Image (spheres, coloured by chain):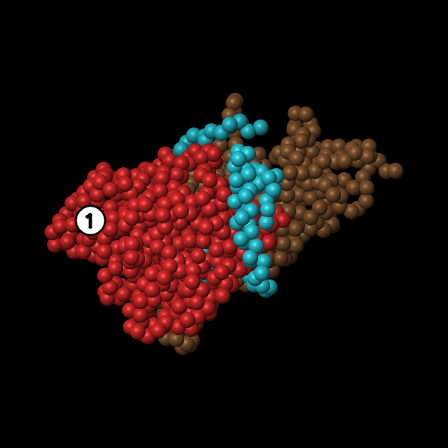
């Protein structure tokens, strides 16, 4: 029995029926990591010492999982993908990870990522890029690239990722798995190494939307350690949800196969009723806003790395980190603050309003996650601006703080996964997952493995 | 030509609040005299991934102080990040307040003169550097302790006045019960800003003097600076804008760093802490507290006089004190924010249909929900606050 | 939007970064390109538009004034830095 590709639901059922043990699941993953990680470089740290589940009968009892290496884990090396923290062992554990452990899940690996979350391909990791399991000459997406690879390749049953500008959704779509970017604040950020504090979200990467819901229910909810955390509500059960298609996300910039797959998915979801087209006019400014707001926050969040209390000194910061710190410092500096940071924060409000207006007319939006499928390693690395533009469809969602889920909806001729993005109003996380679940009952794209 | 010029002096005062815990974490705030780095946690050590959560009583203390200084209290306020590098600043930024401080435009009377208080705001303290042979040691026990910063207008005209203000603020914060203000422990720090001018107008420079930890040193340092600057100006020389430190051995101020390279602190709103919106009720409650303290003080004075033979006023003051206490009790909800939150969330979960009705336009339904919440709390909360919280949470769950 | 070498050095100093001359040149070019791109925001009419203050609508999130001994990290000694004058 191929244990490593079971869904969480299937694994829990099998454990309950004693078809296999938790230890067998753990070993299946560890064996696979040993076999495939040298080629895929998805995992930076393996936790292979036998650790019994805190709660074997919990909702995630004995399910092995991995976490993007931006989540601090007490006593277990946490690098954030950077040489600055290459040997850092945190003294506490992130709330989201604690909640998973309390629900019985077993941590087996820390996943590779673009250093500090800065990137869309994992090529900015100080420990080498991860490879796309569907075609190892291609990127898996980023920054939670390692996490998407572990789930897609059966190295873990699910992963905890982090999405600031598309970092869960893009790798999920490039690797053919399901990735949820939650409503801002829906999952505690306490213990998640900060990238951009007003944009960072913590969320699950799983093989199915049903699994995503299981993980979300465990990690979500107000945390007294995170003053920006909230508890979002249950799924809407209303029928005949109206779907909108924002003009700005479709058309000539897109790979025709991607567009075709997404439009076909819309037909499946709406059962033939066409989606309503509408406009989100400030979409074209979103990347510019992001690269001023996010970098400003980065320039501040990364100031603590001064080697006084932990880690190595700032000379170990990589080029992309330095670039973003400098850009952010510039945008906040005296004389430029109003023209850059303040202006960007104002346009951000307009991007947010575009969505609010759209959600008065429709219930949800569907778009591609990316204009293309996974690009080749090295293709965009030398031009930072081109790399930034890969996030053009995911960034606006983070600026608005609303939730979105990336769901596999097809494959290109070359066999590369295509993902669609379902976007909902603030707090609609569970409804998004319900829509994705219904879609996955009618389709099989999520069942294919590399 | 006069051989004395007009001194122009302003004060920047930092007061450590005597809360139980620090400003943004639950470590003990009473740090003095401990082994280094024993009261530290991920938050005040600035570990990767740590996040701040504001101390509510610290905010109340800051507002009480601002009220006692006759400030206008901002209803809408926030915290901001002040970015700079120094080994005793673990995050590489200090959480402070920039453009929306809790209190502004206050005043204090001294010798019948009105001295302006520009602002009163709340921030966190830094760690301490200990200079040892060959290296320095950093102790973060003090990192994150709540600090109220009081800034006066440059209205002071001589050292004696400045010291009077220092003494008055020292007395005030102890009277309010918000601080111990022990200058030897450094829990109250003064930084005078001094310039001298040929006219009454503000000159284009100021010198900040640090390292003053007693009223005596303050008077000496200010007088020294006035003389030093006067001498330079009378020789037609320029006074450098800078920071100087008082050196008690040499009995003079010594240049520390040039304030000309003014730090660019790149202030921006702290994204990890939601804004503060103070209700009329909260401010009234604190105004009342202030009145009670003042009345109690008057009561003590009257009581002493009574025992010494003088009569009159005691009865009236006692009655007033009792009345004020009653008023205060009425104003204060007895249930804390977090508990109320939990109860209200439960009400929403238990009444999903009512929530849906409200969301679909039946606004009156909120009264039913308020009723249920009040029931659960045994009436121990303010209905207005409950209504606001319900609306906020329903909005989030859309 | 060209950034000069001296500006790059100034920003690097503010940001606590030590750059080699090659890095100063490279970053200067790359940052200039990004700044060129973000100039597009100038065209947006933001009159009377408030900066995004909060995404959750939350206000007044705070806690009681209590000590929690369980969170202390065991240190009991100084962190060392090079001598600060």
Q: Is residue A133 above or below residue B240?
A: below
Closer to us: B342 or A445: A445
Residue C45: give x, y in percent of width and height.
58, 63
Based on the displayed image, in which of its 4 quarters is residue B249 positioned? top right
**Residue at 38% from the left image edge and 41% from the top image edge:** A125
Q: Chain of mark 1?
A: A
Based on the displayed image, in which of its 4 quarters is residue C44 positioned? bottom right
Q: Is residue B394 above or below residue B195?
A: below
Image-based side of B322 in relation to A441, left or right: right
Closer to us: B377 or A339: A339
**Residue at 69% from the left image edge and 48% from the top image edge:** B153
Residue B90: give x, y in percent of width and height.
48, 39
User: Color used for chain A?
Assistant: red
**Residue at 11% from the left image edge and 51% from the top image edge:** A19
Quarter of the N terminus of chain B within the rendering:
top right
Image-based side of B212 in relation to B77, left or right: right
Pointer 1 residue? A4
Residue pushed farthest right? B1
Chain seen in brown: B
Residue B388: give x, y in percent of width and height.
45, 66
User: Color used for chain C?
Assistant: cyan
Closer to us: B214 or B262: B262
Image-based side of A257 in relation to A279, left or right: left
């Amino acid at each position: 029995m191929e244990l490593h590709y079971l869904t969480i639901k299937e694994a829990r059922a099998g454990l309950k029926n004693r078809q296999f043990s938790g230890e067998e699941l753990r070993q299946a993953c560890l064996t696979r990591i040993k076999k495939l990680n040298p080629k895929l470089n998805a995992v930076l740290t393996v936790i292979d010492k036998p650790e019994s589940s805190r709660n074997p009968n919990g909702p995630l009892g004995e399910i092995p999982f991995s976490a993007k290496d931006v989540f601090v884990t007490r006593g277990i090396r946490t690098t954030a993908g950077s040489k600055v923290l290459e040997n850092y062992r945190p003294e506490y554990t992130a709330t989201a990870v604690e909640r998973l452990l309390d629900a019985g899940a077993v941590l087996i690996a820390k996943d590779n990522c673009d250093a500090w979350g800065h990137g869309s391909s994992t090529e900015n990791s100080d420990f080498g890029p991860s490879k796309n399991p569907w075609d190892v000459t291609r990127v898996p997406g980023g920054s939670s690239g390692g996490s998407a690879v572990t789930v897609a390749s059966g190295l873990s049953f699910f992963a905890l990722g982090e999405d600031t500008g598309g970092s869960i959704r893009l790798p999920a779509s490039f690797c053919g798995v399901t990735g949820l970017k939650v409503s801002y604040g829906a999952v505690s950020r306490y213990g998640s190494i900060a990238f951009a504090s007003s944009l960072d979200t913590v969320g699950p990467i799983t093989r199915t939307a049903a699994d995503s819901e299981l993980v979300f229910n465990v990690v979500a909810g107000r945390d007294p350690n995170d003053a920006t955390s909230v508890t979002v509500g249950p799924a809407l059960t209303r029928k005949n949800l109206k779907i909108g298609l924002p003009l700005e996300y479709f058309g000539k910039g897109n790979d025709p196969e991607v567009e075709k797959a997404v439009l076909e998915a819309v037909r499946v979801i709406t059962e033939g009723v066409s989606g309503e087209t509408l406009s989100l006019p400030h979409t074209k400014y979103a990347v510019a806003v992001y690269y001023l707001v996010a970098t400003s926050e980065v320039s501040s969040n990364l100031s603590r790395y001064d080697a006084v209390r932990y880690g190595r000194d700032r000379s170990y910061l990589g080029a992309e980190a330095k670039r973003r710190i400098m850009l952010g410092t510039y945008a906040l500096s005296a004389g430029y603050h109003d023209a850059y940071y303040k202006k960007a924060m104002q346009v951000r409000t307009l991007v947010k309003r575009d969505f609010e207006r759209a959600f008065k007319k429709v219930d949800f939006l569907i778009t591609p996650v990316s204009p293309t499928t996974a690009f080749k390693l090295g293709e965009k690395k030398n031009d930072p601006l081109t790399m930034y533009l890969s996030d053009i469809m995911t960034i606006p969602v983070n600026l608005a703080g609303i939730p979105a889920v990336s769901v596999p909806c097809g494959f290109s001729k070359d066999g590369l996964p295509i993902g669609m993005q379902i976007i909902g109003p603030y707090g609609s996380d569970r409804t998004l997952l319900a829509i994705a679940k219904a879609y996955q009952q009618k389709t099989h794209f999520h069942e294919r493995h590399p | 030509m006069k051989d004395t010029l007009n001194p122009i002096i302003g004060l920047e005062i930092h007061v450590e609040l005597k809360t139980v815990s620090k400003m943004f974490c639950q470590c003990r705030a009473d740090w003095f005299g401990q082994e280094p780095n024993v009261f530290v946690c991920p938050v005040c050590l600035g570990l990767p991934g740590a996040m701040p959560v504001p101390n509510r009583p610290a905010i109340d203390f800051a507002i009480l102080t601002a009220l006692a200084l006759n400030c206008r209290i901002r209803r809408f306020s926030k915290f901001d990040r002040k970015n700079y590098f120094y080994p005793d600043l673990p995050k590489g930024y200090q959480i402070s307040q920039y453009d929306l401080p809790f209190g502004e435009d206050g005043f204090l009377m001294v010798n019948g003169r009105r001295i302006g208080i520009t602002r009163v705001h709340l921030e966190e303290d830094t760690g301490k550097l200990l200079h040892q042979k060959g290296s320095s040691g950093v102790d973060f026990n003090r990192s994150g302790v709540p600090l109220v910063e009081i800034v006066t207008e440059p209205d002071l005209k001589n050292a004696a006045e400045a010291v009077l203000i220092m003494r008055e603020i020292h007395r005030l914060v102890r009277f309010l019960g918000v601080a111990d203000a022990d200058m030897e422990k450094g829990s109250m720090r003064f930084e005078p800003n001094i310039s001298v001018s040929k006219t009454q107008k503000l000159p284009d420079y100021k010198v900040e003097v640090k390292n003053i930890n007693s009223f005596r040193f303050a008077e000496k340092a200010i007088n020294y600076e006035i003389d030093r600057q006067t001498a330079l100006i009378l020789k037609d020389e320029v006074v450098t804008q800078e920071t100087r430190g008082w050196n008690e051995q040499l009995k003079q101020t010594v240049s520390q760093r040039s304030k000309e390279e003014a730090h660019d602190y790149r202030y921006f709103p702290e994204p990890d802490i939601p804004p503060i919106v103070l209700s009329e009720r909260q401010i009234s409650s604190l105004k009342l507290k202030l009145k009670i303290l003042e009345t109690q003080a008057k009561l003590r004075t009257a009581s002493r006089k009574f025992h010494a033979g003088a009569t009159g006023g005691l009865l009236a003051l006692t009655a007033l004190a009792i009345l004020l206490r009653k008023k205060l009790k009425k104003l204060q909800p007895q249930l804390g924010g977090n508990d109320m939150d939990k109860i209200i969330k439960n009400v929403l979960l238990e009444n999903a249909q009512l929530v849906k009705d409200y969301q679909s336009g039946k606004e009156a339904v909120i009264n039913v929900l308020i009723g249920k919440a009040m029931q659960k709390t045994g009436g121990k909360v303010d209905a207005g606050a409950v209504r606001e919280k319900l609306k906020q949470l329903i909005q989030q769950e859309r | 939007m060209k950034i000069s070498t001296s500006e790059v050095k100034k920003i690097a100093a503010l940001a606590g970064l030590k750059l080699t001359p090659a890095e100063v040149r490279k970053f200067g070019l790359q940052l200039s390109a990004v700044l060129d791109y973000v100039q597009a925001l100038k065209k947006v009419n933001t009159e009377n538009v408030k900066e995004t203050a909060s995404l959750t609508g939350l206000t007044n999130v705070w806690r009681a004034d209590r000590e929690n001994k369980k969170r202390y990290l065991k240190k009991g000694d100084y962190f060392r830095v090079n001598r600060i004058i």
